[in-house]
Image: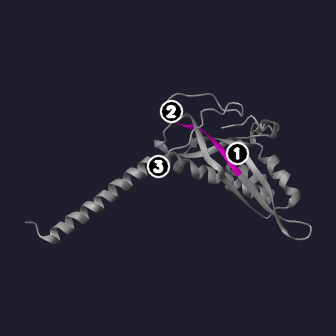
């Protein structure tokens, strides 16, 4: 017969071991290197080619969300300060291939449009309408479809707080850079594209 104190020590040791193993497995599955990407490559997305986006698995969600938070943080700061340079300092590739009409890298237009209101605070909720969806191009590139809401606080002429903004849909193009996901291109869905845009 095994003494009761020995059984408690064995059970406690097994529990600690189990927790460690589960933690290691969860941590490993959430690392950027273990994202589940399809093996076939596809063409770059345009607003008329949005098929193939799927809901991310938990590991992919955890790996990509910091890049989305970072982008939307600097986008919000650019609108509030009226300074696009802060956004471009963190995402220099967004200065390239700008096409306002098509919504490509149109952050400068977004910042400029809000400046007449003189916003002093704001919030961006990237998953307000639905969870983001992903399309893997390869292991180093992914497209993220975001359908959220963007609101900025400002004072009206009678000094009452008001919000301005609204719903947005955008495809964020991310690639691996120095071991982390980084936004290198954006494609805002324009008013002309909105009706055809059905994820």
Compute the Cα span from label 1 to label 2. 28 Å
Name the residue beneath numbered marker 2.
Answer: 38
- How far apart are labels 3 and 1 at the CA level? 27 Å
Labels 2 & 3 near each other (Cβ < 8 A): no
The C terminus: image quadrant: top right
Count of marks, rendered view: 3
Where is residue 50? Give x, y as percent: 66, 34
Q: Nearer the viewer, mark 3 or mark 1?
A: 3
Residue 36 magenta-highlighted: no
Q: Is residue 145 magenta?
A: yes
Q: Nearer the viewer, residue 165 or 44?
A: 165
In this figure, which residue is indicated by the disc labeled 3? 30
Q: Quadrant of residue 1?
A: bottom left
- Main SS of residues in magenta: strand
Disc 1 is placed on an element classified as: helix
Instruction: Please tell me the numbered disc located at residue 109.
Output: none
Estimate the spatial distance between the alpha carbons at disc 2 and disc 3, rounded to whole Å.
Answer: 17 Å
Q: Quadrant of residue 56?
A: top right
Q: Which residues are magenta?
A: 139-148
Q: Which residue is mark 1?
A: 92
Image location of residue 89, percent across then percent down: 70, 51
Q: Nearer the viewer, mark 1 or mark 2?
A: 2
Classed neighbour count for the residue bearing mark 1: other residues with Cα under 10 Å, few (<14), some (14–19), many (≥20)? some
Per the image, label 3 sits on a secondary structure element best described as loop
Residue ID at (85%, 56%): 115
Q: Give residue 46's position: percent from left, percent from top.
A: 70, 32
- Say which residue appears at 60% left-offset and 50% top-offset: 67
Question: Looking at the picture, does residue 179 appear above or below residue 158?
Answer: above
Quarter assignment of residue 21: bottom left
Residue drawn 64% across and 53% down?
Answer: 70
Name the secondary structure under disc 2.
loop
Left of 65 or right of it: where is 104? right
């Amino acid at each position: 017969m095994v003494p009761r104190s020995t059984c408690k020590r064995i059970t406690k040791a097994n529990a600690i071991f189990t927790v460690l193993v589960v933690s290691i497995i969860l941590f490993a599955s959430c690392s950027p290197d273990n994202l589940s990407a399809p093996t076939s490559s596809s063409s770059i997305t345009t607003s008329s080619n949005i098929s193939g986006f799927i809901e991310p698995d938990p590991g992919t969600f955890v790996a990509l969300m910091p890049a989305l938070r970072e982008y939307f943080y600097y986008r919000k700061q650019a609108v509030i300060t009226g300074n696009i340079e802060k956004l471009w300092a963190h995402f220099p590739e967004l200065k390239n291939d700008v096409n306002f009409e098509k919504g490509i890298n149109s952050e400068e237009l977004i910042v400029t449009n809000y400046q007449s209101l003189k916003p002093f605070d704001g919030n961006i909720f990237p998953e307000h309408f639905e969870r983001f969806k992903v399309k893997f191009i390869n292991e180093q590139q992914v497209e993220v479809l975001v359908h959220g809401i963007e609101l900025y606080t400002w004072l009206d002429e009678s000094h009452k707080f008001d919000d301005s903004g609204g719903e947005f849909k955008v495809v964020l193009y991310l690639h691996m850079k120095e071991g982390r996901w980084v936004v290198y291109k954006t494609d805002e869905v324009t008013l002309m594209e909105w009706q055809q845009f059905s994820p």
